[in-house]
Image: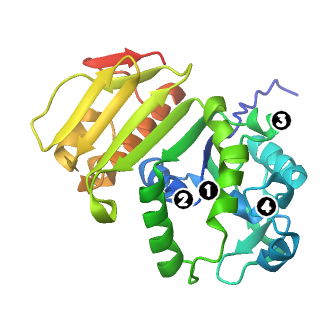
Amino acid sequence: MGDSCIEFRMTYIIGVAGNSGTGKTRFAELVAQIIPGTTHISLDDYHKYDREQRKILKITPLNPRANDFDLMYEHISAIKRGESVVKPVYDHSTGKIIKNAEKFVPGDVVVIEGLLPFYDPQIAKLFDVKIFFDVCKPLELHWKILRDKTKRHYEKQFDLRQRDRDFRKYVLPQREKSDIVLHACSTGRGGKNIRASIITQNWPFHIRAEYIPGRYSLELSEKGITLSGTFTREVLAKILPGLEKNNIPERANAFTAAQLLVIWNILLKRGDLNETTGCTGLDG
């Protein structure tokens, strides 16, 4: 029998942590738009208790007790090896958990997002890059109310004070465990005039140094990258060389532009793109 060699490549897993309503799912959709074949899991599907049970227990989904970390670790480990899993689904419209609801087949890149992806140290080790979404409270609440009314079909039914306590106790500490922090805040009503920043922590980051005229601002400092204004497709195509222009949004606010910069850097690190001239390194 002749010699054979099978090339085995582990699934590249992007982890995204942050509070509810910060845009984690939209980021996963953006990654899939830029990197064909990307698949996505929401860790809401790994809630241990449904909405009524949490009310009885008086705990929020942000509390580690409300999440099944054992099943989470089992499934993410399998996904890392490129294996399919049969996973539960959390129905946001009813608050119910459907066990063994769907088969998940991982792509070469998988985005796993949720409230507590980096809380358990063993699970945190499975991610190739860890990103934390840090959105100021007024903007976060604005996005969450819009989402819950339009996509999840229920009004606010939670104790904001309890959620805020759990966020600060359990979710926020993951920011220090992350490779990249994406921050967003708004200076206008209704989520307008968004200003965003990218802070890297021990993760090499690159940015196109060339300035292209437009109604936007992109500033590089020792602390990170700050973005504001509106980024057109033409500007983004110059800042993000190598990306398919048709996959880039026609217009993007500062937070979306910051996410695109992160995705571009992930492609660079994976070796899917070559570093081009005119890029400046940021070591974090």
Question: Would you say the residues marked 1 and 2 are in contact, meaning their CB atoms lie under 8 Å apart?
Answer: yes
Please provide percent x and percent y for residue 185. Answer: 38, 48
Residue underneath mark 4:
46
| Viewer-nearest of discs 1 and 4 | 4
Residue 2 appears in view: yes
Q: Earlier in the sequence, mark 1 or mark 4?
A: 1
Q: Earlier in the sequence, mark 4 or mark 3?
A: 4
Q: Earlier in the sequence, mark 1 or mark 3?
A: 1
Residue underneath mark 1:
40
Mark 4, Cα crowd under 10 Å, few <14 / some 14-19 / many 20+, is: many
Is 91 placed left or right of 184 in the picture?
Answer: right
Residue type at mark 1: give it: His
Residue type at mark 2: give it: Thr
Q: Quadrant of residue 25?
A: bottom right
Residue type at mark 4: give it: Tyr
Q: Whole-Å distance between the Cαs marked 1 and 2?
A: 9 Å
Name which residue lies at 28% across and 53% down.
Answer: 246
Is 72 placed left or right of 12 in the picture?
Answer: right
Residue 106 appears in view: no
Residue underneath mark 2:
25
| Viewer-nearest of discs 1 and 3 | 3
Q: Earlier in the sequence, mark 1 or mark 2?
A: 2
SS assignment at label 4: helix
Residue underneath mark 3:
122
Q: Whole-Å distance between the Cαs marked 3 and 2?
A: 23 Å
